[in-house]
Structure formats: C-alpha cells, structure tokens
Image: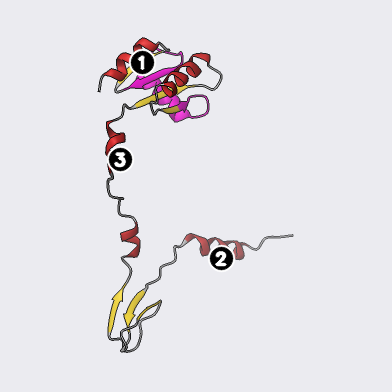
Amino acid sequence: MTINPALVLLFTLTFVFPVQAEIYKWTDANGKSHFSGSKPANPASVENRNDLQTKSSQPAPVTDKAVVTAAAPKVDLYMTQWCPYCKKAMAFLRKNDIDFNTYDIEHDLDAAARKKTLAPDYSGIPLAVINGVTIRGFSEESYQEALAKK
C-alpha cells in the first residue's frame, strides 16, 4: 500500500489552518433577534459578533475567596514519592491545614532544575520554600518559623 503525498498534504492542511467565521446578530422588522453566519439582506439592525472570543478570554473577577487564599502562606515542596522525610513534611502541612504545591523532582525535570537553582549545593530532599524561606530537609520547628513569617 502506498500513501499518496498529495492526500497527506491535503489532510494536513485541513487541520493546520484555523477556521474563521463571522457571527452576526440581527433584529428583524418584528423586533426578533437572530444569530446567523451570513449577513441578512435587509435587517433592521446588524451587529457583528466577532468579539465573542475576546469576551470569553477576559479574566474572572476577583472574589473574596481569592483574596483569602492570597493571604495564605505560599509553600512549595520539592520531593520524591519514596522519601520518608518528604512524607513527614506533607503530613505536617496537611495536619496544620496548610495548602502546598508538590513537585516530584524525579518525574518533573523543570522542578528538578528549579530545585537546583534554589539550593545549588543541596542534593537531598525534601526542599521546602515557605513564604520565600528555603528549608533543607524536614524539621517541624523550621517549618513553623517560616510559616510564622508572612
């Protein structure tokens, strides 16, 4: 079986170029609104709705909940799945109802690179960054001190 290069090119081009369409909202003589992909012949009013995509990409308004979480401590934990000290660190944070982000340095190369820039001479785990304070290993006292700084 041979593959026709022209068909492969045609198939590829169908998915490469984005589809563009205009949506028109128009009101007829009776005042009824219509949406259409083509401009009507004699509408009472026509409105081009190409702004729909722009409106949908607007950021959501800030809510009270977002303000509350912004005041919460920021905790990033660089860890591995098998590390017992990482598990103790996560258990401590959960026990104290502290939200945190975990980054598995064995499965996420970007996280491993970030860890190396945060502590270039530290090859151990866990590495925690709590409110901007970098903590090597796990110590409840160190974590509590860093959490107290806001």
x, y (%) of residue 43? 31, 86
Location of the C terminus (image quadrant): top left
Left of 7 or right of it: where is 51? left
x, y (%) of residue 92? 43, 18
Residue at position x 31%, y 40% from top?
65
Q: Nearer the viewer, mark 3 or mark 2?
A: 3
Query: Residue 66, which numbered label?
Result: 3
Give the residue at mark 1: 143
Q: Disc 2 residue type?
A: Leu
Q: Which residues are magenta?
A: 103-130
Task: State which tag comes first along the sequence, 3 or 2.
Answer: 2
On screen, residue 26 above or below 82: below
- Quarter of the figure with residue 29: bottom left
Residue that sits furthest to the left in the current view: 150
Distance, label 2 to label 1, CA atoms, is 59 Å
Task: State which tag comes first along the sequence, 2 or 1.
Answer: 2
Left of 73 or right of it: where is 17? right
Residue 86 magenta-drawn? no
Answer whether labels 1 and 3 touch (C-beta < 8 Å): no
Residue at position x 71%, y 60% from top?
2
Provide the secondary structure element on which disc 3 rests: helix
Q: Disc 1 residue type?
A: Tyr
Task: State which tag comes first along the sequence, 1 or 3.
Answer: 3
Residue at position x 49%, y 14% from top?
85
Q: Disc 3 residue type?
A: Ala
Residue at position x 29%, y 76% from top?
47
- Quarter of the figure with residue 137: top left
Query: Residue 10, which numbered label?
Result: 2
